[in-house]
Image (cartoon, rainbow, N blue to C red):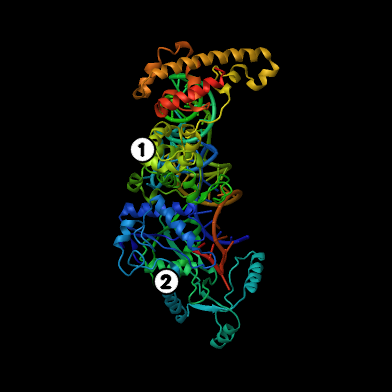
RNA sequence: GCCGUUAUCGUCUAGCUUGGUCUAGGACACAUGGUUCUCAGCCAUGGAACCCGGGUUCAAAUCCCGGUGACGGCACCA
């Protein structure tokens, strides 16, 4: 076993483009990326598209875009991770890095060479068993309580038999699995040992130009000089197969680190049933990259100390595989929400505005960046996700329809425990009380309107406004002024404070909304 | 079924290597109170866990043995 500790650090993410970038794959990407950045190594993106049936270019595009969006940039890969890098791309080479190509579908010549080598060395052979035969054998083994492995029946076919059979039906290539223990050191789990005899002769390729996962991964990790294989725990039992393959070629062994898996609330494998699973879904739901990165890092890893709100640079500095947890982790969306709200507060207003713009457009905002920034300044404290902006800040762009009872304080339904709409018919005296209240509130709103009319536009600043209104607002009855004012301005029962809204809306729009409220109360 | 991994508050986790400093710490969520016209935020306070059974030891979340549960793999997917 070669000492891989002295090799330059090179890690890889090897997604297969059979779906959009999964949040679990993003977590694996992050841990590889953090490890590389922390150690000054290289992070490589390799597209594992050997399964032509299931692979689709559009998923490769989605994976690449999602990784870019998360800011997990790679040093080598099928295309550059940033425009800057793209400029440095060597002429004549369509990929970035010295060990390409980085799509398995473009490396078929390489696999063929190694496959032939294995065949020539009699370490692999053609197998002609049909799927039906294999399935039958599998079931038989299973019912006897034996591991469902292949019998090795085609292992010793003579050359003539091979020729005869290959004319008749399709074949696959199997690797002769040595009856040996495969032992490896896992950085997270310590020493792990498997008895490879239990696996049987695995299929490593459908034919010379159709390699399968375990084979292609071994060839690529070697030829791309991968020093550390950091991947999900679901690959733990693939590792011995890959190690035995490496040994058959005389390759050196990379260092392994198998990450704990991510689960749903019921501890089943993370699925769409309970959570959004693609990074794109989280982007659309209004999460920002820094929050997702922070959250994912904490899923299975923890720094020394109690600090959990961590920026990217801190993560890079603090990260170590030694502190990765062994057990699987449940995906806790509430914590993600909290971290997202924290990172939202941390963003500078310009970047926040850029990110919120698409969400604001859907509720009627158009074009005016100054106005959007003002709205964001007072809304950023109260939103957890960018998408929350639609609900909580929509009223700035378009006043919602509301009934006149919204303007009343004390709140009728709170005071009597009865919804005002019911009160009218059932309890006439309550309805009478409410009419009285409406008149009072209308008077208060008119007083406020008067003050507002006299206030110059340039005094529409939160602190000034509070001072301007102070004399007219009854000390012991603030609610009968502030609630109707705020409700009139927002059309909502819950919103930021009235002075904050006044500042953003400005004189003209504020007066318009106040006027409307007074009308609603019959004034 | 077989092989492997794993087990601390509801959830994410610290502590376990080198037993005592752990009446088990932090965070999210939850509850209560404060700030307040409302909501959010912020602040304070609170409830809440060492999978089970043995053993070693003066002393075990930490070491040993045996169970059990959960998860992953056992593809001509990756």
Secondary structure under badge 1? helix
**C-beta proximity under 8 Å, tags 1 and 2:** no
User: Which of A368 and A96 lies nearest the eye of the viewer?
Assistant: A368
Secondary structure under badge 2? loop
Whole-percent x, y for residue A349 in the image:
36, 37
User: Vertical placement of B75 versus A85: above or below?
Assistant: below
Q: Choose the circle earlier in sequence order: 1 or 2.
A: 2
User: Vertical placement of B16 versus A113: above or below?
Assistant: above
User: Which of A417 and A374 lies nearest the eye of the viewer?
Assistant: A374
Q: Is residue A154 left or right of residue A13?
A: right
Whole-percent x, y for residue B78 in the image:
49, 63
| Mark 1, residue position | A349
| Mark 2, residue position | A107
Whole-percent x, y for residue B39 in the image:
50, 27
Asked if marks 1 and 2 fall on the same chain, the answer is yes
Task: State which mark lies toward you, 1 or 2.
Answer: 1
Image mark 1: chain: A
User: Vertical placement of A444 versus A310: above or below?
Assistant: above
Q: In the picture, which quadrant includes the N terminus of chain A?
A: bottom left
User: Vertical placement of A376 versus A130: above or below?
Assistant: above
Q: In the picture, which quadrant includes the C terminus of chain A?
A: top right
Neighbour class for label 1 at 10 Å: few (<14), some, many (≥20)?
A: some
Neighbour class for label 2 at 10 Å: few (<14), some, many (≥20)?
A: some
User: Which of A225 and B20 lies nearest the eye of the viewer?
Assistant: A225
Say if residue A497 shows up in the picture: no
Q: For residue A59, which numbered disc appears in the image?
A: none
């Amino acid at each position: 076993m070669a000492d891989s500790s002295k090799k330059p650090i090179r890690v890889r993410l090897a997604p297969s483009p059979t779906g959009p970038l999964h949040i679990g794959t993003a977590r694996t990407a992050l841990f590889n990326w953090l490890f590389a950045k922390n150690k000054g190594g290289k992070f490589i993106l390799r597209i594992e598209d050997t399964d032509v049936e299931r692979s689709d270019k559009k998923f490769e595009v989605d994976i690449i875009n999602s990784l870019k969006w998360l800011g997990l940039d790679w040093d080598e890969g099928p295309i550059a991770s940033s425009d800057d890098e793209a400029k440095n791309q060597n002429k004549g080479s369509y990929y970035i890095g010295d060990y390409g190509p980085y799509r398995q579908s473009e490396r078929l010549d390489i696999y063929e060479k190694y496959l032939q080598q294995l065949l020539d060395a009699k370490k692999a052979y053609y197998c002609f068993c049909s799927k039906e035969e294999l399935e039958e054998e599998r079931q038989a083994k299973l019912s006897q309580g034996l591991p469902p492995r292949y019998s090795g029946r085609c292992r010793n076919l003579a050359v003539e038999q091979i020729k005869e059979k290959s004319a008749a039906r399709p074949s696959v290539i199997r690797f002769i699995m040595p009856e040996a223990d495969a032992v490896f050191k896992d950085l997270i789990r310590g020493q792990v040992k498997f008895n490879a005899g239990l696996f049987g002769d695995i299929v490593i390729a459908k034919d010379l130009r159709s390699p399968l996962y375990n084979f292609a991964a071994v060839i690529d990790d070697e030829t791309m000089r991968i020093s550390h294989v950091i991947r999900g725990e679901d690959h733990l039992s693939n590792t011995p197969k890959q190690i035995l393959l490496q040994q058959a070629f005389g390759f050196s062994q990379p260092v392994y680190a198998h990450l704990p898996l991510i689960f749903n609330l019921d501890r089943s494998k993370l699925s769409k049933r309970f959570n959004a699973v693609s990074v794109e879904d989280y982007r659309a739901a209004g999460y920002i990259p820094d929050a997702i990165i922070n959250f994912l890092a904490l899923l299975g890893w923890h720094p020394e100390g109690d600090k959990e709100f961590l920026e990217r640079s801190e993560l890079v500095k603090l990260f170590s595989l030694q502190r990765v947890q062994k057990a699987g982790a449940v995906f806790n969306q509430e914590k993600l929400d909290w971290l997202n709200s924290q990172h939202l507060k941390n963003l500078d207003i310009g970047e926040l505005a850029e990110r919120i713009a698409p969400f604001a457009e859907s509720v009627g905002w158009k074009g005016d960046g100054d106005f959007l920034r003002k709205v964001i300044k007072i809304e950023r404290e109260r939103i957890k996700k960018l998408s929350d902006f639609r609900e909580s800040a929509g009223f700035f762009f378009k006043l919602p329809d509301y009934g006149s009872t919204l303007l009343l304080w004390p709140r009728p339904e709170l005071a009597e425990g009865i919804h005002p709409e019911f009160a009218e018919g059932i309890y006439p005296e309550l309805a009478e009380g409410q009419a009285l209240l409406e008149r009072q509130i209308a008077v208060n709103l008119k007083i406020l309107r008067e003050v507002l009319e006299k206030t110059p536009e340039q005094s529409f600043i939160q602190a000034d406004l509070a001072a301007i209104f102070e004399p007219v607002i009854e000390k012991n009855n603030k609610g009968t002024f502030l609630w109707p004012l705020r409700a009139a301005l927002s059309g909502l029962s819950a919103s930021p404070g009235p002075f904050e809204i006044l500042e953003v809306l400005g004189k003209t729009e504020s007066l318009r909304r106040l006027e409307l409220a007074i009308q609603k109360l019959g004034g």
